[in-house]
Image (cartoon, rainbow, N blue to C red):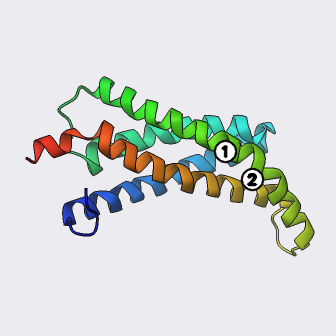
Amino acid sequence: MNLVANSRERTRFIKFMTVGVIGAVVDFGIMNLLSKLYNMPLTLAGTISFICAIISNFLWNRYWTYPDSRSRPVARQLIMFFVVNMAGLAIRLPILHFLEPPLKNFFEGLALNIPFTPGFLGKNFTLMAAVGVVMLWNFFVNRYWTYNDVDKANS
């Protein structure tokens, strides 16, 4: 797969990124809702929000990004997508756990005059970092494993 030379792959990557943005909105929205309303720790709220984003992303990717990748039954493809994303969760959780405290301390030290607390900023910047790292993992592994039937369909 050559994203630079292959316009079809570039289009898929842009669609995958768009789906990722939708998933990030789902992820951030649910994480903030659970953290604020139920005072959940970031690792728990972030896990629940991540699972909701996985479901959203799978549906968008199956039916929009890779519509030509439906040679597999939906249940099998969802399991494959879920496995890749669970590995992504294993990458994500240490980032959430270890990066949040120093980022919160960083924002506390800035003494910003804004309506957001250092805790809110720390959580959201931590989640942003985790989403970025996991997005790269998800794209490449899903493209070569979950959606590898696209290559066969277009041969």
Q: Closer to the camera, 23 or 127?
A: 127
Q: Which amino acid does label 1 sit on?
A: Met
- For the residues labelled 1 and 2, the Cα–Cα distance comes to 9 Å
Q: Which of marks 1 and 2 is in front?
A: 2
Judged left or right of residue 125, residue 1 is left
Position of residue 48 relative to residue 118, above or below, is: above
> Where residue 114 sits: x, y (%)?
83, 72
The residue beneath circle 1 is 31
Q: Residue at x 82, y 68 (%)?
A: 115
Judged left or right of residue 152, residue 78 is right
Q: Which residue is drawn at 47% across and 48% down?
A: 137
Position of residue 123 relative to residue 5, above or below, is: above
The residue beneath circle 2 is 123
> Where residue 29 sits: x, y (%)?
62, 50
Position of residue 17 relative to residue 79, above or below, is: below
Q: Which amino acid does label 2 sit on?
A: Lys
Q: Do the residues labelled 1 and 2 touch (CB within 8 Å)?
A: yes
> Where residue 22 sits: x, y (%)?
47, 53
Judged left or right of residue 124, residue 13 is left
